[in-house]
Amino acid sequence: MNIMSQEKLEEAVSGGMTAKPNEVIKMQGRKVGVFYGDKQALFDVDLDVRQNQVTALIGPSGCGKSTFLRCLNRMNDTIDSARVTGKITLDGEDVYDPKIDVVELRARVGMVFQKPNPFPKSIYENVAYGPKIHGLAKNKAELDQIVESSLKKAALWNEAKDRLNEPGTGLSGGQQQRLCIARAIAVSPEVILMDEPCSALDPIATAKVEELIDELKQNYTIVIVTHSMQQAARVSQRTAMFHLGYLVEEGATDKMFTNPDDKRTQDYITGRFG
Ligand SMILES: Nc1ncnc2c1ncn2[C@@H]1O[C@H](COP(=O)(O)OP(=O)(O)OP(=O)(O)O)[C@@H](O)[C@H]1O
């Protein structure tokens, strides 16, 4: 009798069609274009975001990284002049389908911004707000539990547990950013979008957030915009390089940083432009 390894067996059973967990496509952009008024900022972007991986978006200032990121949870809807074309899916479902509840979408695809932006409320309230409005807790004990576990997942619990009723704005910049990450986590997102989350942080706070990103990928899919090549190399498994509104190339981070296919990527990562 032929004995097969578990992996071979699974492959055989599925006809080789079952993707390994890290190859599952969580979000997909096809021919994505964005216009601000008459001006086109993004052109025909095809990009896959893999589940439980960190995808870094890199490229020179103004190339469209944040614009693309904002397409993924329809944050561009909040900009009057913005118009999005093409298709973006989450687990195969069109996020621009009129049936989609945008509030629900933004809970599934959370966002952390460049500048830490806690609400002018207590640390506790910052984290509890989302679960409250989404009805995720039946009572105070459950809400307390969500706040605690979110702060733990954001590596802030030890620093915050004795000051939960103090204002979130009283935390240091790095702590505030982890509070914003806890706030995103509290509504059980599947994807977390981060737009230059460390640009306002010092190197120590940056290292903490990077460490956290690495841990978070076990449970979440992460897309991060960064200007730091070192950061992209440190935290991501996939890197997408944008230039003048076009996706130049996308690939495994190791390859992108050692042997990119496109000269523009090579020039950018070696600091020749940008
Ligand atoms: N709200 C807006 N209204 C009009 N134009 C915009 C708006 N937001 C971005 N743009 C334009 O779209 C293009 C892409 O901008 P975007 O912010 O996505 O680039 P980026 O790569 O994230 O840049 P940076 O690295 O400087 O943050 C730029 O030309 C920018 O001026």
Image (tube, rainbow, N blue to C red):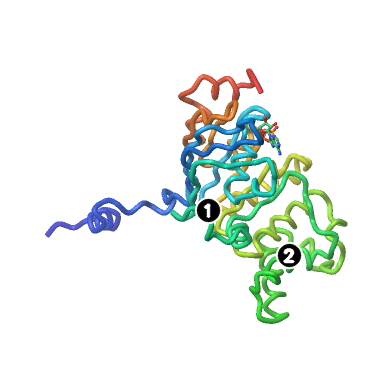
Say if 24 sits above or below 243 in the image: below
- Which structural element holds mark 1? loop
Q: Residue at x 67, y 78 (%)?
A: 142
Q: How many other residues sit within 10 Å of disc 1, few (<14), some (14-19) or many (≥20)? A: many
> The N terminus appears in which quarter of the rendering?
bottom left
In the displayed structure, 160 sits above or below 202; it is below
Comparing 3 with 50, the one in front is 50
Using a 10 Å C-alpha cutoff, classify the residue at mark 2 as few (fewer than 14 neighbours), some (14 to 19) or many (20 or more): many
Q: Earlier in the sequence, mark 2 or mark 1?
A: 1
The residue sitting at 73% across, 80% down in the picture is 140
Foreground tag (2 vs 1): 1
On the image, the x and y values in percent for residue 257 come to 53, 29
Task: Say the numbered circle drawn on residue 127.
Answer: 2
Say what amino acid the circle numbered 1 marks. Val
**Which quadrant of the picture is home to ligand 1?**
top right
Question: What residue is shown with label 1?
Answer: 95
